[in-house]
Amino acid sequence: MGRHTKRVPKMARKKVALQVMRDLAEWSERPPVSVRQQYPDAKFGLAGIQAYAPAIETKPQQHMDSAWHGCHAVNLQWTGRNSTANYLSGLASTDTLAPEANEHLLAAAKEYGAAFATWQEFY
């Protein structure tokens, strides 16, 4: 994002919103091919969280590599959840989508906020 060589045309807010929501749903099950190719043995999305869970079932202090469990692996989790919660709640405060969509956006934002709080507490 910091290396554009020319101005990028502004996209319509609704188009961006729909793409973000599509990506959130799709990437929870299947991230982009380029990511999967770069890390062929990794698990992502919901499957990644499920695979990670056994490593943190006990308190992280009980692991020899607790710094990794509570820092490097988690930083990417809580920051993304917080950003998503903020984006969705902000989107709900606009007239970008139909009014009935805002209830769902706020509910999703609340869940992302709860995930953020839990990851941050673990961190």
Image (tube, grey):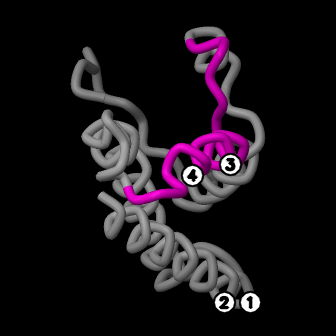
Q: Give, as a three-letter code, the residue at label 2.
A: Glu
Span shown in magenta: 39-59
Q: Give, as a three-letter code, the residue at label 1.
A: Glu
Q: Residue at x 38, y 60 (%)?
A: 83
Instruction: Please tell me how crowded label 1 is: few (under 14), some (14-19), or many (20+) other residues with Cα within 10 Å.
Output: few
Q: Position of residue 64 (x, y in %)?
A: 31, 35
Residue under pointer 4: 16
- In the displayed structure, 99 sits above or below 29; it is below
- In the displayed structure, 30 sits above or below 52; it is above
39 or 67: which is nearer to us?
67
Q: Give, as a three-letter code, the residue at label 3.
A: Gln
Task: Mark 4 or mark 3: name the one nearer the start of the chain.
Answer: 4
Residue under pointer 2: 103
Residue under pointer 3: 50
69 or 119: which is nearer to us?
69
Asked whether 43 falls inside the magenta stretch, the response is yes
| Direction from residue 104 to residue 11 in the image, left or right | left
| Direction from residue 44 to residue 8 in the image, left or right | left
- Which is in the foreground here, disc 4 or disc 3? 3
In what element is the residue under mark 1?
A: helix
Q: CA distance from mark 2 to mark 1?
A: 6 Å
